[in-house]
Image (cartoon, grey):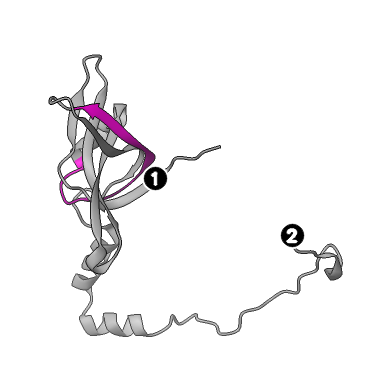
Amino acid sequence: MAINVITVSGNVGKDAVLRVTPNGKHIASFSLPAKSGFGDNEKTSWLNCKMFGTMAEKLSGAVLKGAKVTVCGEFVIEEWTRQDGSQAQTPTVLVRDIDLPPRGGTQPQQQATQQASHSQPQQQRQAQMSEPPMDFDDDIPFAPVTLPFPRHAIHSI
């Protein structure tokens, strides 16, 4: 049995483009970078991502250039014939799941941090972060474990 699942995370290259086919189906397309190698050998390949149906219709407006998204889906190589008659291919992810940035562009954790920074002086925050909580307990209780079979009966597989 073959499994074809790919997960890619990156900043969107261009705003998603929403199209409607002649039979009324919605298709949204956008691109994500996939980096390989490192240092001087680092290479960036752009993957075309496609969402279909209700997902495309509802979420395409949130997939904007520069937004950090993670997609999971099926990897395919799309093939077509160009107008000049030559063959062309492009790596494509048929999106099944997408993780979009929250509306407003900031992460919830960043918002909470920003709110906290306005309500407390900086010295108090630094002291709170460097000290353990007051209910911290160094003694961790462990209960003895009774195995339902003798220890010598355990065999590694």
Q: What residue is rendered at 21% in x and 72% in y?
A: 117
SS state under label 2:
loop
Instruction: Measuring from the top left, give residue 26's x and y in whole percent.
Output: 25, 25
Q: Quadrant of residue 36?
A: bottom left
Instruction: Measuring from the top left, give residue 94's x and y in whole percent.
Output: 34, 35
Foreground residue among 120 and 60: 60
The residue that mark 2 highlights is 157
CA distance for labels 2 and 1: 31 Å
Which quarter of the rendered picture does the C terminus lie within? bottom right
Main SS of residues in magenta: strand
Residue 115 visible in rendering: no
Give, as a three-letter code, the residue at label 1. Answer: Ile
Relative to 54, is 61 on the left or the right? left
Foreground residue among 131 and 99: 99
Give, as a three-letter code, the residue at label 2. Answer: Ile
SS state under label 1:
strand
Q: Earlier in the sequence, mark 2 or mark 1?
A: 1
Instruction: Measuring from the top left, give residue 42's x and y in whole percent.
Output: 25, 62
Q: Which residues are magenta?
A: 62-81
